Amino acid sequence: MNQITTSQASLEDLAILQQIARETFFETFAEANTEADMKKYLAENFSNEKMTAELNNLESQFFIAWHDQSPVGYLKVNFGMAQTELKDSTSLEIERIYVKNAYHGKEVGQILYEKSLKIAQLRNNAFLWLGVWEENKKAIRFYEKNGFVAFDKHIFKFGEDEQTDIMMKKVLG
């Protein structure tokens, strides 16, 4: 397999980012959710308006993973007030790491995670944190392998369904 590369996404990458975001989210969660909830979530969370605002937020960054000329995954990190919960100035939130199913096990997720780790280190953050659905055992194992530990839980509303996310963090030092 050719090398995976990453690039920081900008507003010019909106359509590519929307495509990879919708595709990977659907692959990851469609089986466990209703079609109506999935359609609503994809339409609302990956709309032009919402993603443009996220791309324009100076406290968020997106990175696209590429295999040749094809986007195969992406990363979204937040700091400061862009964080979804903690809003801790000493932390970096990994809001999303999503990889196409066909690229699972091919180090794409690891490359994206290492990108977030490098950003946190450059920013002198004390820790990284994220929320991961309690049923996503594969992702939980991935984060545990990379030194994350559970520290709390929160409810993620998906349509009418309330799902529990495990909040995990990795202290940097």
Image (cartoon, rainbow, N blue to C red):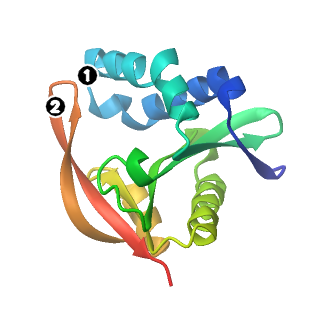
Crowd around label 2: few <14 · some 14–19 · many ≥20 (10 Å): few
Crowd around label 1: few <14 · some 14–19 · many ≥20 (10 Å): some
Q: Are marks 1 and 2 in contact (CB under 8 Å)?
A: yes
At which x and y percent is residue 53?
50, 27
Q: For residue 168, what is the image quadrant?
A: bottom left
Q: For residue 149, what is the image quadrant?
A: bottom left
Indicate the secondary structure of the residue bearing disc 2: strand
Residue visible at 50% across and 85% down?
173
Which residue carries the number 1 mark? 34
Residue visible at 50% across and 72% down?
146
In the image, taking residue 81 as reference, residue 6 lies left or right, namely: right
Q: CA distance from mark 1 to mark 2?
A: 9 Å
In the image, taking residue 3 as reference, residue 107 lies left or right, namely: left
Q: Amino acid at mark 2?
A: Asp
Q: For residue 8, what is the image quadrant?
A: top right
Q: Amino acid at mark 1?
A: Thr
At which x and y percent is residue 147?
45, 76
Earlier-in-chain disc, 1 versus 2:
1
The residue at the far bottom in this view is 173
Viewer-proximal residue among 110 and 63:
63
Viewer-proximal residue among 27 and 76:
76
Q: Which mark is residue 161?
A: 2
At which x and y percent is residue 75?
57, 46
